[in-house]
Image (spheres, rainbow, N blue to C red):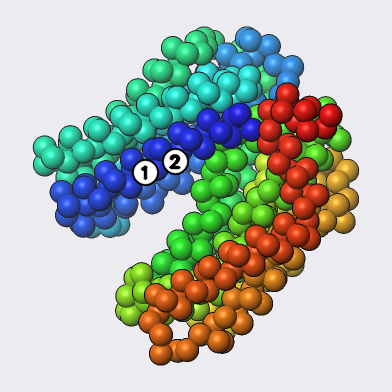
Amino acid sequence: MSGIAWTGGVKWFTQILSWSSMIIIAHLLAPAEFGLYGMALVFLGLVDLVSELGLSAAIVQKKNLTADQVAQLGSLSLLFAIVLVGLTLAVATPLAAFFGQPRLRWLVVLMSANMVVKGCAVASRASLAKELRFRELAVIDGVQALTLTVATLALAVAGLGAWALALGAVLANVIGSILTLVIRPQRLSRPRDLRSLEPSIWFGLNVAAARLSWYAYSNADFAIVGRVLGAASLGAYTIGWNLASIPVDRLTALLGNVTPAVFAASQDDPSGLRRYITGLTEGIALLTFPLAVGLALTADLAVPLILGERWLPAVVPLRLLALASVMRSVAPLAGTMLQATGHARMQMRLTTSWAVLFPVMFYFGAKWRGTEGVAWAWIAGQLLIITPSLAIALRRAINLRPSDYARTLIPATTGTAAMAIAVLGIRALVPASWSPAIRLSAAVVTGVATYAGVTFLAHRDRLVRFRNILRPPKAAARVIA
């Protein structure tokens, strides 16, 4: 919880900083400059997923690695980053030709330096995580984000256009890597004993493959909507996806910085791991279920009020994608548990199967009912494929029974169901002649009050137990006494 507190505090600070600076930068740079930077990220974002070959996850997960083995794994990661830079240099010109943007070539070349810069500190950062030094990691991330904001703003004011975005990112990674190496010095040594490193390398390869598969199935819907339905439909679908993901992505990113190392440190304690995942899953559900369902129930009021009437086509996909995000919010935690307990191959097989199944579902959904059909494919996939397969995998990995896993969702589910009934009721009672702002406010206030009341009254003992988990040990001991 200390790690989550430090990471969360810094992340929210840097997020506010990022939003504020982006508004200013948006006034300084033309849309075409942002577009050019986005084109570079199409390729580099994919490459970055595997730039360290999954070896940072291996360093965190493998408990018995010697200092020399960590040094060799750090060198392997850096060497692979250099290889990827060579690949990037080779495709920079064809990529620029594909988009018809000659400047893109040198932008991609510059941004590829990030892989080597971050590669120098892979072992150091992984060691900090393994040692549960989240305070130091939060400081590093905060300094890096501050550097990114200040540098990008200064370069944008200087009139460098898309180069301001690229140079700001490179400079921020340089500062972040240097600070990481200062806080946690880590030597690198020539990989000379590959046989002893083989388990870690295979583990890393499975993690990298799982990341690629995740990228494939989680972005296939955008590609299919754009190809089958066109740019206008993709725009509406993208807005719906972004809004529906707000309750999920922020919390997932926060936990993703902390839970892998904590789970890995407890990998020899199955009962402890079961407590961790059931407790955290229950907490995530209590936060995200009402937010997601509430967004689905009020989308038709919120979208035109906040975004304008022209975005009404985004209402239906937003509603369905928000419902899909109910289970999407708790799924990443199960995947992290598999990886942290050494079941990276199982995780890779699951994500690879999803990368095959989901694009097919998206395609037929798009042909069936357009963006609405694609969103329905997400709901069906979450309920019928992802959730059951993860429940089975957790049973194999830590002997967590599916019934125990499902039981953690009861407080959030019952409270959210009562909230949905109350919101639908108040919406039926409030006259349609009232302004959308008043109707939306009435629905939100009713939903919040109902959810809080029902959850507290029906599951007070569960909430008290969860609150005690969050307290410092001494405070918790006083409560027990």
Q: Is residue 103 visible?
A: no
Q: Amino acid at mark 1?
A: Ile
Crowding at label 2, few (<14), some or many (≥20) Cα neighbours within 10 Å? some
**In the image shown, does 209 or 25 lie closer to the viewer?**
25
Looking at the image, residue 294 lies above or below residue 435: above
Residue 331 as seen in the image, left or right of residue 320: right
Crowding at label 1, few (<14), some or many (≥20) Cα neighbours within 10 Å? few
**In the image shown, does 467 or 380 lie closer to the viewer?**
467
For image coordinates 45% across by 61% down, the residue present is 242
For image coordinates 72% across by 57% down, the residue present is 456
Q: Amino acid at mark 2?
A: Trp
User: Where's the C terminus, which quadrant?
Assistant: top right
For image coordinates 70% across by 16% down, the residue present is 65
Which corner quadrant of the image does residue 199 belong to? top right
- State the residue position of label 2: 12
Q: Position of residue 318 (x, y in %)?
A: 50, 71
For image coordinates 51% across by 63% down, the residue present is 244
Q: Position of residue 257 (x, y in %)?
A: 57, 35
Q: Is residue 384 visible?
A: yes
User: Where's the N terminus, which quadrant?
Assistant: top right
Q: Position of residue 48 (x, y in %)?
A: 46, 39
**In the image shown, does 10 or 61 lie closer to the viewer?**
10
Looking at the image, residue 151 lies above or below residue 324: above
Q: Which mark is residue 413?
A: none
Determine the CA span between mark 1 and mark 2: 6 Å
Q: Which mark is residue 16?
A: 1
